[in-house]
């Protein structure tokens, strides 16, 4: 089993920045690809950004150029730096990981989420 704990959410004005962090613990061998996902009210959960253990990244088109994902393999931490936030970024953000090399929407382990609210 893997436990994921997110932190760093909150309320920010449009144009501002937030940094989310996720710490993974437990069965370390089950931690490979990691990612951030979000679910806005009334919408399905969507991929935001993912990163492989080797550092290959993937971003949703809606966040490219504004968000940056990074990880520390030694500490099993994955961060999401969010800049130029817009109200449409308001959502619960979830951290996830999988034993697989690449992330997908079907990740094995999920955190409980952290709320990000962007005011206009």
Image (tube, grey):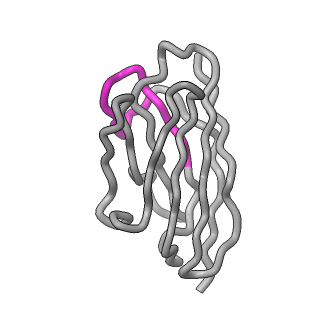
At 67% from the left and 58% from the top, the residue drawn is 9
Q: How many marks?
A: 0
Quadrant in the picture for residue 41 = bottom right
In magenta segment, residue 81: no
Query: What x and y, as percent, mark residue 34?
Result: 44, 35
Query: What x and y, as percent, mark residue 30?
Result: 48, 17
Q: Vertical placement of 86 versus 55: above or below?
A: below
Q: In the image, which residues are magenta?
A: 94-107
Q: Vertical placement of 31 versus 11: above or below?
A: above
Q: Quadrant of the C terminus?
A: bottom right
Query: What x and y, as percent, mark residue 109?
Result: 52, 28
Query: What x and y, as percent, mark residue 73?
Result: 50, 28
Looking at the image, which is closer to me, 11 or 70?
70
In magenta segment, residue 103: yes
Looking at the image, which is closer to me, 40 or 85?
85
At 62% from the left and 63% from the top, the residue drawn is 116
At 46% from the left and 45% from the top, the residue drawn is 70
For residue 101, side relative to residue 112 (left or right): left
For residue 100, side relative to residue 73 (left or right): left
At 56% from the left and 68% from the top, the residue drawn is 90
Quadrant in the picture for residue 1 = top right
Q: Main structural element of the magenta stretch: helix, strand or loop?
A: loop
Quadrant in the picture for residue 76 = top right
Q: Vertical placement of 73 versus 90: above or below?
A: above
């Amino acid at each position: 089993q893997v436990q994921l704990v997110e932190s760093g959410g909150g309320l920010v004005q449009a144009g501002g920045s937030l940094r989310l962090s996720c710490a993974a613990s437990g069965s370390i061998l089950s931690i490979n690809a990691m990612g951030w996902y979000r679910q806005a009210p009334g919408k399905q959960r969507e991929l935001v950004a993912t990163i492989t253990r080797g550092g290959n990244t993937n971003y949703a088109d809606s966040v490219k150029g504004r968000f940056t994902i990074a990880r520390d393999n030694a500490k099993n931490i994955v961060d999401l730096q969010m800049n130029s936030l817009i109200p449409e970024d308001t959502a619960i953000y979830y951290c996830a990981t999988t034993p697989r090399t690449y992330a997908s929407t079907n990740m094995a382990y999920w955190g409980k989420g952290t709320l990000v609210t962007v005011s206009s």
